Amino acid sequence: MWPSRGRPRAGVHQLFPLQGGPMSESIPELEPNCGSWIVTRKRDGHVIGEFFSRGVVGQFRRDEYLIETAAQYLTRLNQSLLPTQRQVMSDTQNLSPGKAGAA
């Protein structure tokens, strides 16, 4: 047993509100070549973490947390970045060769 240094570390079930009911309810099935779920707090978009166990993911309250497969999360993240990427590409294309490095 490891020596205790103050307060014991809390598990996921102690840090975040739990959901009552069946754990598999509204947990998306993993796509091929996808082995984890991403849990995001709905109120502020903060990513809680990546989880590899359906049982752990099933403990989060669905009304407070968004549960997505890693593939779904990355797709949503990439789509949210598209407008920014398009703007950067447009700004880059509008630079003339003589002004590209000038300050």
Image (cartoon, grey):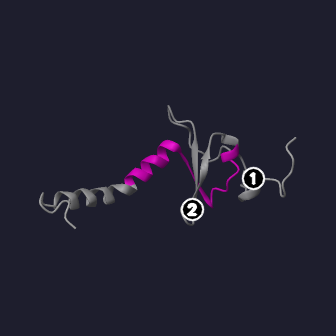
Residue 68 percent location from the top left of the image: 54, 48
List the single residue furthest toward the top: 32
Determine the residue positioned at 85% across, 43% down. 2
Q: Residues within 10 Å of mark 2 (few under 14, many from 20)?
A: some
Task: Give 26 or 9, whichever is nearer the viewer.
Answer: 9
Task: Give 23 or 76, whichever is nearer the viewer.
Answer: 76
Residue 30 percent location from the top left of the image: 55, 37
- Does 65 appear in magenta? yes
Is residue 35 left or right of 102 when viewed as pictured?
right
Residue 55 percent location from the top left of the image: 70, 42
Picture quarter with the C terminus: bottom left
Determine the residue positioned at 56% across, 43% down. 28
Residue contact at pointers 2 and 1, CB within 8 angstroms:
no
Residue 14 percent location from the top left of the image: 77, 56
Q: Secondary structure at mark 1?
A: helix
Position of 2 relative to 40 (above/below)? above
Looking at the rendering, the stretch of residues picked out in magenta corresponds to: 56-79
The disc at residue 42 is: 2
Position of 94 relative to 70 (above/below)? below
Report the residue marked by disc 1: 13
Q: Which quadrant would residue 51 be assigned to in this image?
A: top right
- Does 24 appear in magenta? no
Determine the residue positioned at 20% across, 60% down. 101
Looking at the rendered structure, the number of numbered marks drawn on it comes to 2
